[in-house]
């Protein structure tokens, strides 16, 4: 069964609904360019399930959707959260979730894509290109750190290092913002891709041609942590990136 996540995290950053919608729209367009079959049609989400109607990925449509889904108080502090689902024939089911725009010094922001399927496995082209998808998330959302992982890898790393959900870590691939990238070892067993804003994707799958063992991922985390590249942001947060 396929269960792979690509995500990114960052600290407090005040943003308008339109700014968030612009980032999300740009992300969805870039994803469609990577794999049109998987990222073709997006549905609104109700109780973690895809529902009608289909939602256009335009800035105006996404801004209206974000506003409609966030009606509570203090949104400028807690931020805006919502998600979309894509369920296309012969493709993995994908959720696109965001939490952005708040100024709380105790809550991190996130963008995530989750791929789930009983028919499609990890050899699918869209999964092989997951490190490229991580780069897309990093560049559109200006994230602090991010990763690609399968559930067994995530659990193994969390247990080995005693990590909280918001702690930076390396999975099959890792994204490091500019400050983190400057501390990263240069000889980890993967490919290095520089991104906009001075960030770095380290891809342990080498473009989807390799499947790193959990021991390899643990070793990469050990070395990145020792170098300071995976040090969590200080709490309470005083910035959005390292």
Image: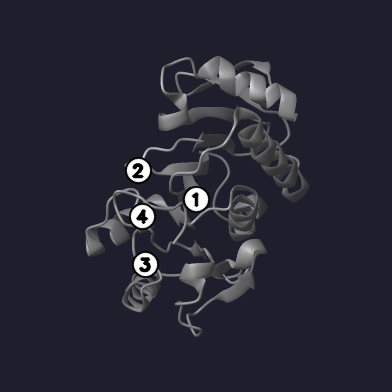
Residue located at (44% from left, 44% from top): 12
Q: Nearest to the eye among marks 1 and 4: give it.
A: 1
**41 left or right, relative to 161:** right
3 or 2: tag closer to the N-terminus: 2
Q: Report x, y in % for residue 59.
A: 73, 30
**141 left or right, relative to 239:** right
> In the figure, 163 relative to 113: above or below?
below
Q: Nearest to the eye among marks 1 and 2: give it.
A: 2
Q: Report x, y in % for residue 164.
A: 27, 51
Which residue matches tag 3?
214
Residue located at (36% from left, 70% from top): 221
Q: CA distance from mark 3 to mark 4?
A: 9 Å
4 or 2: tag closer to the N-terminus: 2
**Depth check, front residue: 189 or 98:** 98
Q: Nearest to the eye among marks 3 and 2: give it.
A: 2
Which residue matches tag 4?
154
1 or 4: tag closer to the N-terminus: 1
- How packed mark 2 is, by other alpha carbons closer than 10 Å (few <14, some 14-19, many 20 or more), is some
Which secondary structure, mark 3? helix
Q: CA distance from mark 1 to mark 2?
A: 17 Å
Marks 3/4 in contact by CB < 8 Å: the verdict is no
Would you say residue 208 is visible in this rendering?
no
Residue located at (60% from left, 50% from top): 137
- Looking at this view, name the residue that lies furthest to the bottom: 187
Q: Which mark is residue 8?
A: 1
Q: Report x, y in % for residue 112.
A: 51, 43
Q: CA distance from mark 4 to mark 2?
A: 26 Å
Which residue matches tag 2?
105
């Amino acid at each position: 069964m396929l269960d792979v996540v690509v995500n990114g995290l960052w600290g407090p950053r005040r943003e308008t609904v339109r700014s968030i919608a612009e980032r999300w729209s740009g992300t969805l367009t870039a994803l469609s360019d990577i794999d049109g079959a998987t990222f073709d049609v997006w549905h609104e989400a109700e109780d973690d399930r895809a529902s009608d109607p289909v939602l256009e990925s335009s800035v105006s449509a996404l801004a209206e959707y974000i506003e409609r889904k966030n009606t509570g108080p203090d949104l400028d502090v807690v931020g805006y959260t919502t998600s979309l689902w894509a369920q296309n024939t012969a493709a993995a089911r994908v959720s696109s979730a965001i939490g952005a725009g708040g100024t709380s010094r105790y809550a991190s922001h996130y963008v995530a894509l989750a791929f789930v399927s009983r028919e499609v496995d990890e050899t699918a082209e869209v999964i092989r290109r997951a490190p490229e998808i991580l780069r897309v998330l990093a560049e559109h959302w200006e994230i602090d750190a991010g990763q690609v992982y399968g559930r067994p890898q995530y659990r193994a790393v969390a247990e080995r290092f005693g990590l909280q959900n918001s702690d930076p870590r390396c999975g099959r691939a890792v994204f490091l913002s500019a400050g983190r990238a400057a501390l990263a070892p240069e000889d980890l067993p993967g490919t290095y891709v520089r991104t906009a804003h001075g960030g770095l994707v380290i891809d342990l799958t080498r473009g989807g041609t390799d499947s790193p063992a959990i021991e390899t991922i643990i070793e990469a985390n050990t070395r990145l942590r020792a170098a300071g590249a995976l040090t969590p942001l200080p709490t309470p947060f005083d910035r959005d990136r390292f």
